[in-house]
Image (cartoon, rainbow, N blue to C red):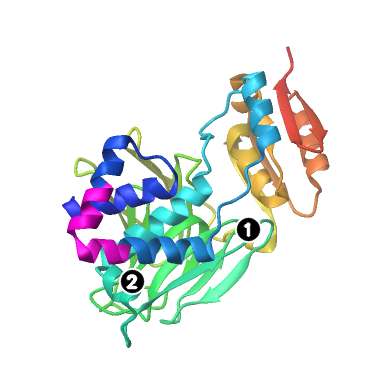
């Protein structure tokens, strides 16, 4: 990692008010001594604060969680949603070497495009190369378009289904944390949520190459009808068969779970119904379910799940609390 890359990582931390005094001093020194970094620094802060004002925190819920001592699976205290959006913008611009060009406003260069879906909605987009993308609820896709250079690059937060326009001379690369998915022309689903350590890729057509960032993990190729689960923490990639005919059922409003833990299921329910769901213990969170839901409301889904494998739940104005039966 270059010194400039380290400085931009510090900028990401600063936008989240997470700098140490030593890091703050390094930023100040760099701003004084590096005019190029100073221009990019101030332009990026102005740009991001303009289009993404900070989210309002759920203070009552946060205080309740701390007081009751709830435990969660992969649920960070900080607003990962906001942090990650900042990080992917910075890293996308750096990786393309276009951050200075973009913010200095030169003409006839690729510009930043942000595609997103709000809570409980699915949006479809067509990129400049003809690639079709469906974005699941609360998902973001960042690109620099029109595409040029040696590849087409995008960064994904959340979940998306892709039908990539075929172009063997210009590979399509999607970056998610610790993983790079490289395709030529194919149809697949990619799921990578910051609060879920497992990344999942299902391939329906064509062929894709998965390249983990760690040098000690071998790349893997997927064929149609295969699914890959990648865990960057334990460096494991598991490839299995999947139903190639059931393409990203979420595009039609269907929630489909196959032997999934309740910890994972509630993350999907939170995004779909835009509500907070708390699990108070690992015993309940580790329960596994196979189920499919279409138009059922949240209360009915919870009722059906609790009857299949016993747990207690309580719904209030502040969200849902789930406990194991003891």
Q: Is residue 93 left or right of residue 316?
A: left
Q: Is residue 218 left or right of residue 264?
A: left
Look at the image and say whether residue 30 sits in the magenta stretch. yes
Quadrant into which the C terminus falls: top right
Label 2: which residue?
184
The one nearer the camera, 109 or 241, is: 109
Which mark, residue 249? 1
Q: Residues within 10 Å of mark 2 (few under 14, many from 20)?
A: many
What secondary structure predominates along the stretch shown in magenta?
Answer: helix
Residue 307, compared with residue 160, is above or below; it is: above
Residue 127 in sight in this render: yes
SS for callout 1: helix
The one nearer the camera, 142 or 298, is: 142
Look at the image and say whether residue 111 sits in the magenta stretch. no
SS for callout 2: loop
Residue at the (69%, 42%) spot, across then down: 291
Q: Give the farthest residue toward the front.
A: 32
Residue 249, compared with residue 309, is above or below; it is: below
Residue at the (65%, 35%) spot, across then down: 289
Residue 64, compared with residue 119, is above or below; it is: above
Residue at the (62%, 57%) spot, across then down: 137
The one nearer the camera, 105 or 128, is: 105
Residue at the (22%, 66%) spot, across then down: 36
The picture places residue 180, in percent across and down from the top left corner, at 32, 56
From which residue to which does the magenta span run? 27-40
């Amino acid at each position: 990692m270059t010194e400039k890359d380290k400085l931009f990582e510090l900028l990401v931390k600063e936008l989240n008010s997470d700098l140490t005094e030593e890091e703050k001093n390094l930023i100040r020194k760099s701003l004084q001594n590096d005019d190029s970094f100073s221009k990019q620094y101030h332009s990026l802060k102005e740009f991001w604060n303009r289009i993404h004002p900070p989210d309002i925190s759920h203070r009552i819920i946060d205080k309740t969680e701390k007081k009751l001592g709830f435990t969660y699976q992969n649920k960070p205290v900080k607003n990962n949603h906001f942090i990650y959006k900042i990080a992917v913008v910075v890293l996308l611009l750096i990786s393309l070497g276009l951050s200075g060009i973009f913010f200095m406003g030169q003409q006839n260069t690729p510009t930043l495009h942000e595609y997103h879906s709000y809570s409980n909605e699915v949006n479809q987009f067509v990129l400049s190369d003809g690639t079709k993308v469906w974005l699941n609820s609360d998902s973001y896709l960042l690109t620099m378009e029109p595409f040029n250079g040696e590849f087409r690059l995008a960064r994904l937060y959340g979940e998306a289904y892709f039908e990539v326009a075929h172009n063997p001379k210009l590979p399509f690369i999607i970056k998610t944390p610790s993983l790079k998915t490289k395709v030529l022309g194919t149809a697949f689903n990619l799921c990578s949520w910051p609060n879920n350590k497992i990344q999942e890729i299902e391939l329906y057509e064509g062929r894709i190459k998965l390249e983990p960032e760690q040098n000690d993990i071998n790349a893997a190729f997927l064929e149609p009808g295969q699914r890959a689960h990648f865990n960057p923490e334990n460096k494991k990639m598991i490839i299995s068969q999947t139903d190639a005919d059931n393409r990203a059922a979420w595009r039609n409003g269907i929630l489909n779970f196959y032997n999934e833990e309740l910890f994972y299921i509630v993350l999907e329910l939170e995004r779909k119904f835009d509500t907070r769901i708390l699990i108070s213990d690992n015993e309940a969170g580790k329960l596994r379910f196979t189920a499919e839901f279409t138009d059922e409301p949240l209360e009915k889904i919870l009722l059906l799940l609790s009857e299949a494998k016993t747990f207690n739940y309580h719904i209030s104005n502040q969200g849902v609390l789930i406990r194991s039966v003891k």
